[in-house]
């Protein structure tokens, strides 16, 4: 405590880790606390942390893929609507052509008779 003095008052978080870690380890060993077990638990926590970070990255990537899929779906929907409209217009145009052709044939037959 005397070595640190009043530096702790303005120190950022974890500023004294390098100084305090050996002291803490020595105190734990003197009280019979198994530091190997602590290291094992810390390692397991780190492993879980890495797995969770990987899972979060996968979820974010999946979200991006879903956004792309939604965009493509909207585009496809617009194209389908446009196709339906154009096909209906073409159907009407062909019907009118057929009507005109039938009318011309009827008039030609009537003029010949």
Image: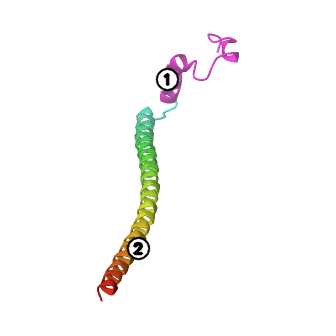
Which of 12/101 is in front? Answer: 101
Vertical side of 44 occupied by 15: above or below? above
Which of 95/78 is in front? Answer: 95
Marks 2 & 1, CB-CB < 8 Å contact: no
Q: Quadrant of residue 86?
A: bottom left
Q: Can residue 5 be found in the magenta stretch?
A: yes
Q: Which mark is residue 68?
A: none
Which of 90/64 is in front? Answer: 90
Q: Which mark is residue 26?
A: 1
Gap between marks 2 and 1 measured at Cα: 98 Å
Residues rendered magenta in the picture: 1-30
Provide residue 93's location: percent of width, then percent of height: 40, 69
Q: Secondary structure at mark 1?
A: helix
Q: Which residue is mark 2?
A: 96
Q: Secondary structure at mark 2?
A: helix
Which of 72/65 is in front? Answer: 72
At x 43%, y 67%, the residue is 89
Q: Residues within 10 Å of mark 1 (few under 14, many from 20)?
A: few
Q: Quadrant of residue 82?
A: bottom left
Vertical side of 10 occupied by 85: above or below? below
Indicate the quadrant containing the N terminus: top left, top right, bottom left or bottom right: top right
At x 42%, y 72%, the residue is 92
**Nearer-N-terminus badge (2/1):** 1
Provide residue 2's location: percent of width, then percent of height: 65, 11
Provide residue 105's location: percent of width, then percent of height: 31, 80
Task: State left or right for residue 94 relative to residue 49.
Answer: left
Task: State left or right for residue 94 relative to residue 6.
Answer: left
Vertical side of 74 occupied by 87: above or below? below
Q: Quadrant of residue 9?
A: top right
Indicate the quadrant containing the C terminus: top left, top right, bottom left or bottom right: bottom left
């Amino acid at each position: 405590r005397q070595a640190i003095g009043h530096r702790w008052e303005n120190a950022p978080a974890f500023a004294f880790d390098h100084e305090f870690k050996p002291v803490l380890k020595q105190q734990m060993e003197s009280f019979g606390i198994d530091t190997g077990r602590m290291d094992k638990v810390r390692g397991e926590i780190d492993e879980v942390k890495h797995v969770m970070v990987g899972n979060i990255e996968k979820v974010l990537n999946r979200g991006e893929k879903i956004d792309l899929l939604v965009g493509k779906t909207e585009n496809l929907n617009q194209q389908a609507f446009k196709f339906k409209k154009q096909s209906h217009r073409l159907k009407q145009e062909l019907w009118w052509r057929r009507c005109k052709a039938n009318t011309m044939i009827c008039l030609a037959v009537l003029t010949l008779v």
